[in-house]
């Protein structure tokens, strides 16, 4: 997957705010072209066509009246004026602040475009990791209501990582997966075929009335939010997913945690933005487990990094190592042993 992005310029009169705005812009997948205080903005940028949107934050607008008058007169790109200092990066309010910023930006520019080349995903070399099937899995029920449900959240670079993860798992693993992948609806059917092309899991797009099941990867629908019954039936809420990207990873995590509590989990794979960072603390508070792909193995680590910053992630590793840890986590649970992670 590759991304092409609108070009953004940041103007802030405090170093901290400029830093936070720049990180938020880059983390959402946009191309940050310039970040500067107003007094250091070069003349060439005033009427430059190399910027698609200016994001402006000035704590003392009166001080910059002359600058603003000239800028408003000469700039060919629209300007988004921010309305307050960003909260600290580790604050619970930070993900919501970043989400509001992105929502406002979408009034002026498109969201970054992700071009997907799913058919080109290579099979995972089976010699890289070989996880034997624990004897406890053979005694676990394979049909009926799912006992354990894990959300796989992904965006840019996600399909490659999720495929490696699934290819590394034994098919007998008694876990039902819900995949919340930011992707255009036209690619979802192809995604379902590719993800389970080289493993024994079944994979398909979930619709209203479908069931979660062990040995199955259900892809969350793009067009509407879903919740879950006690027996694993997926039900449309009649609403769109919230936020700028669909499906919402936050809502997927929250809705699974609401139903499955301590038997739920979430793994945040490669992706841009911070989707998942709002619901991760909620899943942890209900007894669920939150893991993330390690930054050095991600095509884009913004999303798992944002969830790590909440303090809720108990384990970070490569997709193969995450698969190994999940097998051991479930094995210990079935045998009555305490969790290791």
Image: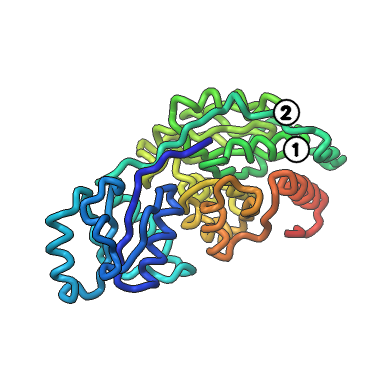
Query: Helix, strand or loop at disc 1?
Result: loop
Above or below, 152 against 215 in this view is below
In the rendering, at what x and y percent does residue 3 appear?
46, 39
How is the model colour-coded? rainbow
Instruction: Locate residue 83 relative to residue 162 in the image: left or right.
Output: left
Above or below, 40 against 45 in this view is below
Choose between 236 and 303: the one closer to the eye: 303
Give the residue drawn at x 37%, y 45%: 244
Instruction: Locate residue 304 relative to residue 105 in the image: left or right.
Output: right
Give the residue drawn at x 30%, y 50%: 105
Instruction: Locate residue 332 relative to residue 259 in the image: left or right.
Output: right
In the rendering, at what x and y percent does residue 90 appear?
49, 69
Neighbour tally class for label 2: few under 14, some 14-19, many 20 plus, Cα within 10 Å: some
Above or below, 99 against 175 in this view is below
The Cα atoms of the two marked residues, 1 and 2, are separated by 8 Å
Neighbour tally class for label 1: few under 14, some 14-19, many 20 plus, Cα within 10 Å: many
Above or below, 71 against 14 in this view is above
Q: Tell me where residue 67 sits by quadrant.
A: bottom left
In the rendering, at what x and y percent does residue 147 appear?
67, 42
Choose between 18 and 84: the one closer to the eye: 18
In the rendering, at what x and y percent does residue 23 appear?
44, 60
Please identify the quadrant where the C terminus is shown: bottom right
Q: Name the residue under label 2.
A: 199
Give the residue drawn at x 40%, y 60%: 22
Q: Please tell me which of labels 1 and 2 falls first in the chain.
A: 1
Residues marked 1 and 2 touching at CB (< 8 Å):
yes
Give the residue drawn at x 44%, y 31%: 184
So how many labels did they put on this image? Answer: 2
Q: Tell me where residue 177 sits by quadrant.
A: top right
Query: Helix, strand or loop at disc 2?
Result: loop
Q: Name the residue under label 1.
A: 169
Choose between 309 and 133: the one closer to the eye: 309
């Amino acid at each position: 997957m590759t991304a092409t992005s609108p070009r953004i310029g940041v103007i802030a009169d405090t170093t901290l705010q400029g830093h936070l705005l720049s990180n938020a812009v880059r983390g959402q997948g946009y191309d940050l072209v310039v970040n500067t205080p107003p007094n250091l903005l070069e003349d060439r940028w005033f009427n430059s066509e190399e910027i698609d949107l200016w994001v402006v934050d000035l704590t003392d607008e009166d001080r910059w009246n002359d600058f603003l008058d000239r800028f408003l007169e000469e700039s060919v790109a629209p300007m988004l004026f921010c309305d307050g200092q960003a909260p600290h990066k580790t604050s619970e309010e930070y993900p919501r602040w970043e989400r509001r910023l992105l929502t406002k930006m979408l009034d002026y520019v498109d969201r970054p475009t992700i071009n997907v080349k799913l058919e080109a995903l290579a099979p995972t070399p089976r010699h890289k990791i070989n996880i034997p099937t624990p004897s406890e899995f053979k005694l676990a029920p394979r049909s009926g209501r799912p006992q354990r449900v894990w959300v796989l959240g992904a965006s840019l670079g996600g399909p490659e990582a999720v495929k490696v993860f699934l290819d590394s798992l034994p098919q007998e693993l008694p876990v039902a997966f819900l995949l919340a992948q930011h992707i255009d609806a036209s690619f979802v059917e192809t995604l379902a075929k590719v993800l389970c092309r080289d493993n024994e899991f079944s994979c398909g797009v979930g619709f209203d009335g479908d069931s979660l099941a062990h040995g199955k990867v259900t892809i969350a629908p793009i067009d509407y939010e879903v919740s879950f019954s006690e027996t694993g039936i997926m039900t449309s809420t009649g609403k769109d997913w919230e936020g700028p990207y669909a499906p919402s990873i936050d809502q997927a995590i929250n809705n699974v945690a609401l139903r499955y509590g301590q038997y739920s989990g979430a793994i945040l794979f490669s992706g841009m933005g911070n989707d998942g960072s709002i619901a991760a603390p909620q899943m942890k508070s209900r007894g669920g487990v939150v893991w993330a792909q390690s930054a050095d193995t991600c095509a884009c680590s913004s999303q798992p990094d944002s969830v790590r910053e909440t303090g809720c992630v108990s384990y970070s590793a490569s997709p193969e190592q995450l698969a190994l840890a999940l097998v051991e986590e479930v094995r210990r649970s079935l045998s009555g042993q305490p969790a290791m992670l």
